[in-house]
Amino acid sequence: MNTLDYTLLLSVCVRDKRLHRVEGVPGDAGLKGEVGHIGKMGPSGDEGDKGDKGVDGPSGLKGKPGTTCDCGRYRKVVGQLDVNVGKLRDAVKFVKNVVLGLRETEERYYLLVKEPKRFRDASMNCKLRGGTLAMPKTSNTNRLMAEYVLQAGLTGVYIGVQAQSTVGPGSYVYADSSPLQGFVAWSKDDELHSRPSPATNSSCVELLSTGTWGHVECEASMFFVCEFPKSRRRGGGGGRGTPASASS
C-alpha cells in the first residue's frame, strides 16, 4: 500500500467515526475564578427621598435646682457704691476748686496762674500746660473769669485776645486766631480812645475784675488765666483736658 492509498483510507475512517459519534452528558461546572480588578467609579446618583422621622429618644435626667438670688444684698452693695462714688466726686470737686483753684464750665477748666509774664510768655506757658490763654467768648464765661480775678484780689490779668493787623485796622482775634464775634466787653474808655495801631500788632488785652476788657502793652508783666478743654470721655473730668502742673 502506497502513501496515497493510506491517506485515503485514513480520511474514510475519520469520516465514519464522526458519523457514528454520540454527544456525552455535560460535565460539572468549573471552580469560580479570582475576583477581577475594580473598575472606574460611576457617576453619583440622584439624592434620595428624605427618610421617616425616627423614634423620640428617652428624656434626660432632671437638673439640679438653682440657687436663690440674694437681691437685697446686691442692692445694698450697689447702694454703697453709689455713696462712695458721690463722696469721690465731692473730693475731686474739692481738689479742683480749693486745692488747685480751678474754675469750670460744662466744656472747659480755667486756671489763674500767679506768675507775672509778658503776653507771649504767658501764652507759651498755657500751651506747655496743655491749654491756651483763656478766651471769654460768652458773657457767662466772662463773668466767671472776672469773679475768679476778683476773688484772687487782683485787678486785671492777661486773656487770649490780641490785636491782629492782618485781619483789618483795629481788629482783634482770640488766641485760637478766630475773630471776635458776638460778645465783647470793652470798657467805654478803651472802646473810644485806645485803639491800637494796626502797624505795630503789639496791643494785648487784660480782663479787669469788673468784667470789662482793657488795652495793655504786650511787654507788660502780668498774671494770666489759662483754659483747658474737658475730656470727651464720660464723666467730663480728668484725662486729656486736665491742666498740667496746675499748682501754680
Image (cartoon, rainbow, N blue to C red):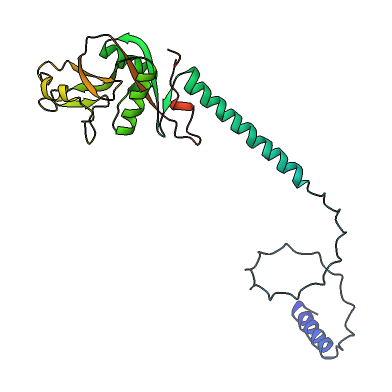
Q: Indicate the position of residue 108 as horizontal and vertical percent values.
A: 39, 29
Compared with residue 243, is residue 82 higher up or lower down, i.e. above or below? below
Q: At 76% across and 77% down in the image, what residue appears?
A: 3
Foreground residue, 175 or 32?
Answer: 175
Would residue 68 be found to the left or right of residue 236 on screen?
right
Above or below for 229 versus 24? above
Residue placed at 32% from the left, 16% from the top?
224
Q: Is residue 216 above or below residue 242?
A: above
Q: Which residue occupies 81% across, 84% down? A: 14
What is the number of callouts on the image? 0
- Residue 219 placed where, x, y %? 22, 9
- Residue 141, image quadrant: top left
Instruction: In this rendered view, identify the residue nearer to me: 120 or 216.
Output: 216
Q: Which residue is pictured at 11% across the width and 27% down the height?
A: 168
Q: Splitting the image into 4 quarters, where does residue 171 fall?
A: top left
In the displayed structure, 58 sits above or below 213; it is below
Q: Position of residue 77 (x, y in %)?
A: 71, 38
In which quadrant of the rendered view does residue 56 lie? bottom right
Where, quadrant-wise, is the N terminus in this rendering? bottom right
Towards the viewer: 177 or 34 = 177
Left or right of 49 in this view: 229? left
Quarter of the picture containing the C terminus is top left
Q: Position of residue 57 (x, y in %)?
A: 84, 67
Lateral position of residue 217 relative to residue 6, left or right: left
